Amino acid sequence: MPRTLFEKIWDAHTIVDRDDGQTLLAVDWHFCHEGSFHGFNALTEAKLPVRRPERTLGMADHYVPTTSRDLNAIDNPEIRSVVDQFYANTERFGVRMLGIEDKDHGIVHVVGPEQGISQPGLIIVCGDSHTSTHGAMGAMAFGIGASEVAHVFATQTLWQARPKAMRVTVAGALQAGVAAKDVILAIIRQIGAGGALGHAIEYDGSVIRGLSMEGRMTVCNMSIEAGARAGMIAPDKTTFDYLKGRPGAPDPADWPAAEAFWRGLQSDPDATFDTTVRLDGGLLEPMATWGTSPEEGAAVSGRAPDPREIDDADRRAQFQGSLDYMGLNGGVAIADIPIDRAFIGSCTNGRIEDLRAAAAIAKGRQAKVPAIVAPGSMPVKRQAEAEGLDRIFNDAGFEWRESGCSMCVGINGDLAAPGEHVASTSNRNFKGRQGQGARTHLMSPASAAAAALQGRIGDVRDFAPRAL
Ligand code: SF4
């Protein structure tokens, strides 16, 4: 039987199928962060060890400061207590953990691929929605809940219902100024925030094939924002070139066998998908969200919808509610939406290529509003500094930070003020995501840099990228 990429990985990890449709899966890697204390508490109560500590990796990313690499810089005792608890739990259970003092520290979804741990054909789980990021490597990767975290800690297995298969093809070629973030925002706008519910998405087509690994991770990262269980891209030469030589990658002697196995993971030519979606990449423009759901986005040359022109009552009420929260009038031109602050970073867009794209716009220009750049990891930060990107950002009035989730969610205190419009390279624009009353506009790193320069969303294509 011809099979899809997802089916091949699923079948290879199936331990047993239950009559109620649940499958027990073997888990290759379990990533955890500070929010995993419920799972550690459950282990403590049950007097159980972590089943495979050598296949478990912790990252202190959500709660840690980005202004310093010193835990003593955390002045909120509750935040400090969560971080301390994570350090203590990982040590007690023998789990390797990358704290802020570690040279390889970073956001969990940046670190896994960067260290070569996230590889094609694996099942990777983490108590975090954006685990789908690792699907860019050709892995099946998904977020799990607190009780599932405890189950994986204790057994290195997981019960799951088999998702349906969706193929999203992005054909053609992208125009100048259009980035991976614009592609995924366009996909979510087209299929909706629930468009991929119950599916594992496989992205394909010439646009996807043409993306770097960083771009592919941006796309897979936001699969969850379309409701998908996972998002993945079949491994190819781009994947193999990215992985080669990374610490967790196969040794040179094992590489030919690994690559041959990975090549076999591609969906068979006549494999069938439950749902197929197609976009013409050549028609895409830079995008930005105007509302409070990632599906509420538009091209920067377009306008937010005017609820008065929408017949469907539910949709009209949804859009009106979003516009009210965002302090915007229906029909406003996207480019004219004011911006009070910019954030460049997160597991969606905190990688070196993202910082280069933003720096190429910021170079030799001046930010009109406060802007921070938080690299996705310390290796990204070191690389950026080696290339002089930190100086470009500092000279342009952007604040250069340490690695961590930072303003993506603001748990560490990096927050926007109520009412502020934030140009953000993160993945969620839900109400209050970046602070109570804060208004998030999702966009690409280059677009966020351009927005910081203008104090409005504008159009990144008005700024010629400068050589770095
Ligand atoms: S950067 Fe944002 S989305 Fe990514 S893991 Fe951190 S909080 Fe979650």
Image (tube, rainbow, N blue to C red):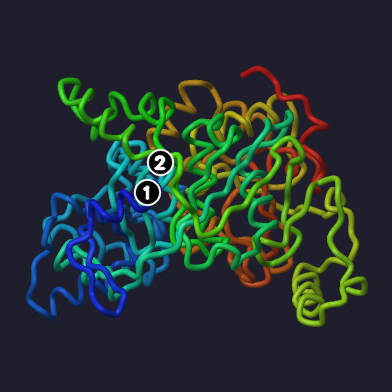
- Image coordinates of residue 202 in percent, x first then y, are 48, 48
Which residue appears at 61% of the width and 19% of the height? 468
- Extreme residue toward the top, this view: 467
Q: Nearer the viewer, residue 450 or 180?
A: 180
Which residue appears at 59% of the width and 68% of the height? 194
Quickly name the residue at label 1.
3
Which numbered tag is attached to residue 268? Answer: 2
Q: Nearer the viewer, residue 393 or 271?
A: 271
Which residue appears at 19% of the width and 21% of the height? 252
- Image coordinates of residue 129 in percent, x first then y, are 44, 62
Amino acid beneath label 2? Asp
**Where 383 sits versus 115, above or below?**
above
Amino acid beneath label 1? Arg
**Where 324 sits versus 279, above or below?**
below
Contact flag, marks 1 and 2 (Cβ < 8 Å): yes
**Where 160 sits versus 57, above or below?**
below
Q: Label 1: how many residues lie within 10 Å, few (<14), some (14-19) or many (20+)? A: some
